[in-house]
Amino acid sequence: MSETAAGATEAGKAKPINPLLKLALEFGPLAVFFFANSYGDRLFGVASDRRIFVATGIFIAASLLALALSKILMNHLPRMAIVNAVVVTVFGGLTIALDDAFFIKVKPTIVNALFGCVLLGGLWFGRSLLALVLDSVLQLDAEGWRKLTLRWGLFFFVLAALNELVWRTQSQDFWVAFKVWGVMPLTMIFALAQTPLILKHEIKREGAEG
């Protein structure tokens, strides 16, 4: 019980950081993965077909480093960042240990499908679980949270399907580039597209500061 209380207290003392720094912590490991896969043969002297394994090892290290920096800078570990770091470590470790790139390629499919199942499953039981992650950022009414959760849940399944389509039909280098230059812009565009919904269902906290 004391550990739970301590965790709640710690989360309540989360420190704000520069948005650009926060973005770097979230997407930095993915950019490092892309860079290592693109230039691994020149930088590390490995064969071109071995770049993915070197890049995966660096991806794991970068993800764990970003998680540690998040804790130091924000005094808080975002739930999604924890899940992503754990899955990257597990599937990246399997990729290296079994010498099979299948595991790192299927990782986004599993993560996005998992997020989609959690969000839509929560709605099935009458809970908008997205509110647990974003309630400190957004203040929406119940209908707004329900619609936003439904949209993000479906979007995660779309990302899972896209990942399966790309890695099974395209080259390895194309798949890595798609993760950075395809998934990130798509996610940002989708997030921006939710602005009208958010504005419509936002709860105005008049006089809250006073």
Image: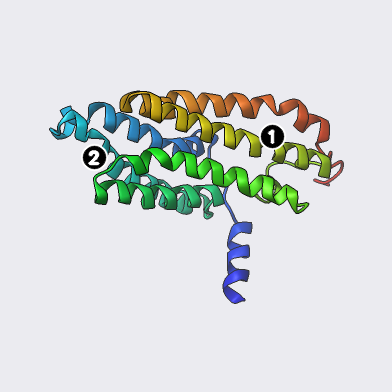
Check disc 1 and report the residue beneath it: 151
Q: Tell which of 172 and 75 is nearer to you.
A: 172
> In the image, 207: left or right of 92?
right
State the residue at coordinates (57%, 31%): 158
For this orientation, the residue located farthest to the bottom is 1
Residue sitting at 50 percent across and 44 percent down? 111
In percent of width and height, residue 91 lies at 37, 48
Percent coordinates x, y for residue 29 in the rendering? 39, 39
Residue 200 visible: yes
> Where 63 sits versus 168, above or below?
below
Q: Determine whether the residue tagged by mark 1 lies in a helix, strand or loop.
A: helix
- The answer to whether residue 181 is left or right of residue 52 is right
In this view, the residue in front, 126 or 186, is 126
- Which image quarter: residue 171? top left
The colour style of the image is rainbow
Residue type at numbered disc 1: Arg
The residue nearer to you, when weighing 5 against 154, is 154
Q: Secondary structure at mark 2?
A: helix
Residue 59 falls in image quadrant: top left
Q: Which residue appears at 38% of the width and 32% of the height?
A: 31
Mark 2 belongs to which amino acid?
Val
Res. 128 visible in picture? no
Q: Which mark is residue 54?
A: 2
Residue 7 image point, x, y percent: 58, 65
